[in-house]
Image: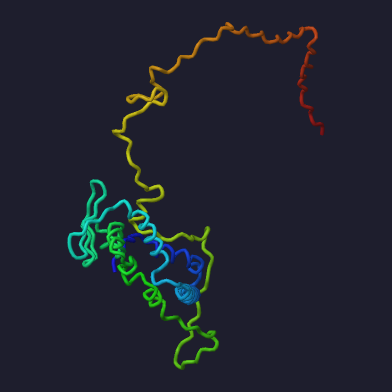
Amino acid sequence: MDCDAVDNGVSESFNSDVLDARRKPVITMLEDIRCWATQRLCTQKQKGLSWDLDICPSIRRDIEDLKELQGFWVPYVSGYKEFEVFSGNERYVVDLNQRSCGCKGWQLTDIPCVHAISTISSLNLDVEAFVSNSYTKASFLSSYEYNIHPLNDSSEWPHVEGLLTILPPLRRRLLGRPCVKRKRDHAERELSGHTRHTVSRAGIPLRCTICYQTGHNKATCPSKPTPTPSTAGPSQSTPAPSTPTPDVNEVPLKKAHVKRAPMKKTL
């Protein structure tokens, strides 16, 4: 099976689902992940059984969108199920026997491209018959065919002789706020945070926002309007109120400090 999805959306979706479980100890974390996987398998299987079509709904929607664009392409037959499809100056070779197209879209996704759909429709054939079996309802159900059986409580487990009882480690609260973010790879750290590489603006011509010309900015623009002086004239500042000088005769004199001689002690 070929697939055009090259991102890591599956791993990111799994990390978001087990975000709460990752904060717990190892055994508790694994138990939470087991319960989540059990419900996930059952839910996906029930969803697949509810489909009334042979093709997955998302693939069928993509095919319906491509059918709306097939009218822009004109197929010319050149052999048994071999066509040349063109639209304007573009042309591609479509081979229904090999299930291939010159645009490589059919080979990449295993889903007929718009050029192949135009040729299939010209023969009055079913487009879904040329879709890979990997996108069928039967393949989807086979992925969720097996389930995870439930378990009783650990107190109901059979006792095994000769095994040591391993106690859980002592939990201690670490300093600071607990980290909930996923530890990124070294290649991912270079693209995020303060170490993110920014593209230099060297070589990019400046463009003025006033005259929209290149080579200068608005600070050095020759068309920049000059400020006109005010016609009201210089403003006359009002003199500050003077502080009255106190009269010398009115200032009370300080009492002179008289130094007294120390008293002699008499026997």
| Quadrant showing the C terminus | top right
Question: Is residue 30 at least partly visible in the picture?
Answer: no
Q: How many marks?
A: 0
Q: Where does the image place residue 163, in percent across and percent down from the top left?
A: 45, 89
Instruction: Determine which quarter of the picture holds residue 110.
Output: bottom left
Instruction: Determine which quarter of the picture holds residue 185.
Output: bottom left
Placement of 262 over or under 48, stated as above or below: above
Question: Is residue 246 at least partly visible in the picture?
Answer: yes
Q: Residue at x 60, y 8 (%)?
A: 235
Give the side of residue 118 with respect to residue 169, left or right: left
164 and 200: which is toward the camera: 200
8 and 99: which is toward the camera: 99
Q: Where does the image place residue 1, in percent across and percent down from the top left?
A: 29, 69
Q: Residue furthest right?
A: 267
Placement of 208 over or under 121, stated as above or below: above
Q: Residue furthest bottom?
A: 161
Q: Where does the image place residue 46, in percent across and percent down from the top left?
A: 48, 75
Give the side of residue 149 with respect to residue 136, left or right: right
Placement of 71 over or under 203, stated as above or below: below
Q: How is the image coloured?
A: rainbow
Q: Where does the image place residue 33, in percent across and percent down from the top left?
A: 47, 73
Q: Residue at x 76, y 7 (%)?
A: 248
Q: Residue furthest left?
A: 79
219 and 83: which is toward the camera: 83
